[in-house]
Image: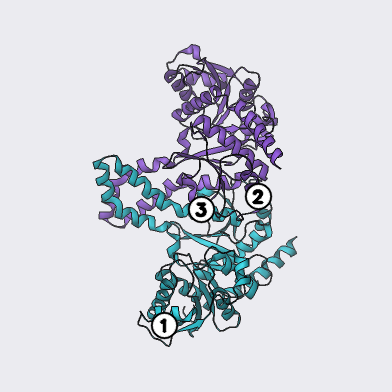
Chain colours: A cyan, B purple
Amino acid sequence: LNGISQDIITIALDAMGGDNAPVNDVAGAVKTVRETEHINIILVGQQDIVERELKKHSYNTSRISVHHCSEVIGMHESPAEALKKKPDSSIVIGTNLLKQKKADAFISAGNTGAVMAASLFILGRISNISRPTIGESFPTDEGVSIVFDVGANMDCKALHLLEFAVMGVVYANHMFNIPNPRVALLNVGEEKSKGNSLTFDAYRLLENSGLNFIGNLEGRDVLRGKAEVIVCDGFTGNVILKFAESIPAVLKGKFMQYAKKNFLNKMWVGLIYKTLKKILKDFDYQNYGGVPLLGIKGITIIGHGSSSPLAIKNMCLKAELMFREKINNVIEEKIKDIKSYIQKSE
Amino acid sequence: LNGISQDIITIALDAMGGDNAPVNDVAGAVKTVRETEHINIILVGQQDIVERELKKHSYNTSRISVHHCSEVIGMHESPAEALKKKPDSSIVIGTNLLKQKKADAFISAGNTGAVMAASLFILGRISNISRPTIGESFPTDEGVSIVFDVGANMDCKALHLLEFAVMGVVYANHMFNIPNPRVALLNVGEEKSKGNSLTFDAYRLLENSGLNFIGNLEGRDVLRGKAEVIVCDGFTGNVILKFAESIPAVLKGKFMQYAKKNFLNKMWVGLIYKTLKKILKDFDYQNYGGVPLLGIKGITIIGHGSSSPLAIKNMCLKAELMFREKINNVIEEKIKDIKSYIQKSE
């Protein structure tokens, strides 16, 4: 963060979000103010419950405040309905704090769909972005590959994939310090003619976009570090992400099955278990600390329902970096440039 | 195969197909006639080359014959073009042997698209099947989950997914001896309302199909044995399959990286390497012996380009079982029943 202003930023944190609310949210807030210097937190939630939880911790009380709201949106409620029915919920109120510039970012481990919908309706989209996106980072031997979209957009058009690519490039560039991120299209073969009607159109758009587009990648390439930004429709991305997340448990299951066969196997597996756990940690995407919803006018980060206090703190750090890097301004400029570049070359 | 007629069946085998043609194809043919009793093989390919290769082996010469053809379709040729340009290729000629009832099945480790196209154009579709499909079996703790489609159909409609489900159920029933296979729709959430427009429509069709439909499964459930038949469009299925196939190499890479850190780690990884290899074998889908193209009037099995002689033999055994179980007749009956059931209940 050299040379960037180190003013205090204020993060609105959904205290009622996630499977362990408010315990993990409050512990995450405390961990953040203890371990950082420039982040203050507004915990958004039912005042009595949040304050009771806060009392269990010692921390600099001037850096965490509580903003009361009376309602909570459940993890499995229908987003659109919940937003209408619960205007005084932590997700709506937290997003409004961002809209009113009383907070610089909003973070929630709550109902993903509701957070996305609230951001979209209350904050609105960045100009020239028709579809906000969420991406997930897959660690590779080379560094990181970020797949956009992993679930915000089910039915996509080629233009949406172009927008994902632009937002992805800005994100990879500013958040991971990658100078000229390579962009690839997730597809079923390397050839330009492969795929479905979406990838057919998206290929043509991407190759004429001026982005560092390297062509198609297949499912087998996602973890191989061939591109920093991989774009696909949110249905495919979500299926892939959840499949990948299941790998550690599946492998543990296989090792256990192998161990059950005989005593020697059992001994072996016992011996290697710790090593295995270390190695499988890479697949544990949920500990990385949430994913931003890119393309909206504001910084919103969505965490897994199971987010630990560490994950909450990582989400706060991510929000701080996004804020200081002015990600949204850069996206707004870049998408304008790319769209006018494409129009000129047509 | 109790009680089923054990007449000799004849399999046309593409001797020019795959990365190691004709070496692995010929070795696979020899392995098959040596290790089975009721399969004879016609090797389809350039006579001099195939016979030269055959001479390296000893086998019952009355059970393997060579059917000459002058042309070969390369692994990366465009299927439609190749079929037009090369009417005397092993893929076209082998499929014609099936059409002319000179063979009971056709097997190829060659150009997948070309084999599919040849089957579709030369043999035609089973009545009431609009889209033939290929599926891949994923081993689970419970047994097997077969995903249809994994690459034959890029842009799908709900009706196609219903057809995949019907073919999948017949296949799981007759090839894996599963009495009433559970059918699931691959989706991004459990709720009926989740997903894209395709899964929205397909859910409604499947739940009223009379099949044993258990609802949506997510990416994380594919390897968990919750359903024997999982349907999705061929784009998503192909991306998932190739992602899964990459896991062993990715994990090996991670272990190697871990080993490089220090001597103790290196020793550990050395000790566990064999165990690890055994456990990762399950992800090695290409050794299972090819996938059938279901929904065409004939038995066609397509193998990986890298098919070993063992994989070729496994493909022959699969073809034999499909033949003896009269899979295509059963599919024809079942799809007729299901479609009339759906019409009646509408």
Question: Distance between the Cα atoms at labels 2 and 3?
Answer: 25 Å
- Vertically, is A72 above or below B97? below
- Vertically, is B346 above or below A331? above
The percent coordinates of residue B123 (x first, y second) are 67, 26
Task: Please say whether residue B1 is visible from this viewpoint.
Answer: yes
Marks 3/1 same chain: yes
- Vertically, is A312 above or below B344? below
Task: Please say whether residue A214 is visible from this viewpoint.
Answer: no
Which residue is at 62% across, 67% downward? A81
- Vertically, is B16 above or below A105? above
Query: What residue would you read off at disc 1?
Result: A37
Marks 1/2 same chain: no
Disc 3 is placed on an element classified as helix
Disc 1 is placed on an element classified as loop
Answer with mark 3 or mark 1, whichever residue precedes in sequence.
Answer: 1
**Residue type for callout 2:** Leu
Question: Distance between the Cα atoms at labels 1 and 2?
Answer: 49 Å
Query: What residue would you read off at disc 2?
Result: B198
Which residue is at 44% across, 42% downward? B140
Looking at the rendered image, the quarter that the C terminus of chain A falls into is bottom right
Query: In front of the other: label 1 or label 2?
Result: 2
**Residue type for callout 1:** Glu
How many numbered discs, if any?
3
| Mark 2 Cα-neighbour bin, 10 Å: few <14, some 14–19, many ≥20 | some
Query: What residue would you read off at disc 3?
Result: A222
